Image (spheres, grey):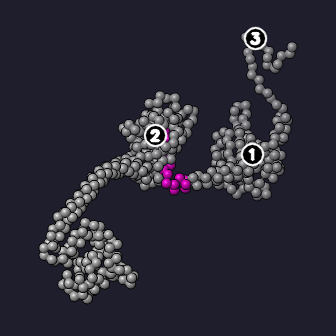
Amino acid sequence: MGKAPGSQKHSASQPVRSRKARLPAALLQQSLVAASSALVITDCQQKGNPVVFANPAFENLTGYNAGEVLGESCRFLLGKDQGQESPEKIRKALKGEQPCTTVLRTCRKDGSLFQSELSIAPLRDSAGKATHFLWAQRDVTEQKKKEEGIAALIAEKERRFAAYVGNVNEAIWRIDFEPPIPLDDPESRQVQAIFDNGVFAEANDAVAHIYGLTEGREVIGRPLKEFLEQANPGNVERMVELVRHKFRMKNLLTHEKDANGTASAIVNNISPEIQNGQVRYVWGASIDLSEFFEAQEDLGRSRKKLAVQKKALEEKNLALKELITHIEMDKKDLKDRIMANVSQVVIPALDKIRLNNGADGHVEQLRRALEDLTSSFGLKVADITTKLTPRETEVCSMVKNGLASKEIARLLNIAPHTVEKHRRMARNKLGLANKGINLHTYLNSLE
């Protein structure tokens, strides 16, 4: 069987010789001519490093034919735009006989400009000295437009994001860890690294306001532990919780202090950037809920105070109910005693006076008045006739008992027309005027 090239074994006495393929010069020239990239060769041994070869792809790209560029310096491709930074980079590479690649604005023969990616490489002689340079040129105008468009789009998005972040009420921040925190480190070491290595790298103004400052830039560069005290056991517990959740958490409550030492209760949503198993930084969005928690505490205190007041009020209501019950009992007892005294003592005594002295009219009025006292009439008259004068009340009482105006005048020792006047005033005050209701009938209806 035949052996593949290079598979023949060599004896120990026969050294292995490296072989370099040598292509015929004509084949190399054909390759340069047929290449799709625009190629130019310059002779750096001549003054000005002139062009000694240009392939058809170069002619198509620039509009110059080979005869027009032979013997010329490649600087003609820059046209009037000689002040670019890239030519300086090329000059240093040529002087140092080193390869380089750069992008520069290039001018075609018709004056139109395009973005050109230019790569140069030295061609050396057997002694290693550069004798020529190979220039490879590629039109990257469309590529650069796309890159510039993408860059502009990214810049616009960054501008909008920065504007959003700068104006939202929510505190948005980034904390970097240098060095990064390995996720496979022991839990306690990761927690310690958060306090030791955490530094604010991004912060909007809302972050500054949480920490008693004015602008976000005042926060950037400050260590996390300046605001998040490790001495607070609650903060350590929260960082343990964060580590156990791989640095990704929602509604993580931390107790922090501002630049003046004032304590704040902060609720955080946190998301990490992890590379190669290490946490490089975390993004966060935070809200200061100190006022909310203070309001909750105030509400709790108010509820306790209201509960105490409610209990005291209930005790007072109970005592009041007992007092009202006693009053009602006392009222009933008083009424019973009045009725008993009037019916069993006063009225019998009046009967005896009437029999003995003959003052029948006055005694009869007194008797009926005492009887009214033990009925509901007195209460109703007192309630309805609060605007009656004492004399009007006295007249109404006699009218109720069936006395005529003359009898009333005699008993009260006043003129009859005065009695009529009092009766008329009483009717008006009782709302009986022009109603055709008899005063005697009305008063007796109050029983």
Range covered by the magenta-colored residues: 162-177
For residue 259, which numbered disc appears in the image? Answer: none
**Disc 1 residue type (three-letter):** Gln
Question: Sequence-wise, which precedes: disc 2 or disc 3?
Answer: 3
**Disc 2 residue type (three-letter):** Gly
Is residue 264 shown above or below 370?
A: above
Q: Residue at x 47, y 35 (%)?
A: 241
Residue 225 locus on image (x, y percent): 41, 41
Please rate how many residues cluster around mark 2, counting C-alpha atoms within 10 Å: few if below 14, some from 14 to 19, many from 20.
Answer: many
* Residue 253 in which image quadrant: top left
Q: Which residue is mark 3?
A: 11
Q: Which residue is mark 2?
A: 198
Quarter of the rendering occupied by the N terminus: top right
**Disc 3 residue type (three-letter):** Ser
Is residue 418 shown above or below 338?
A: below
Closest to the camera, between mark 2 and mark 3, is 2
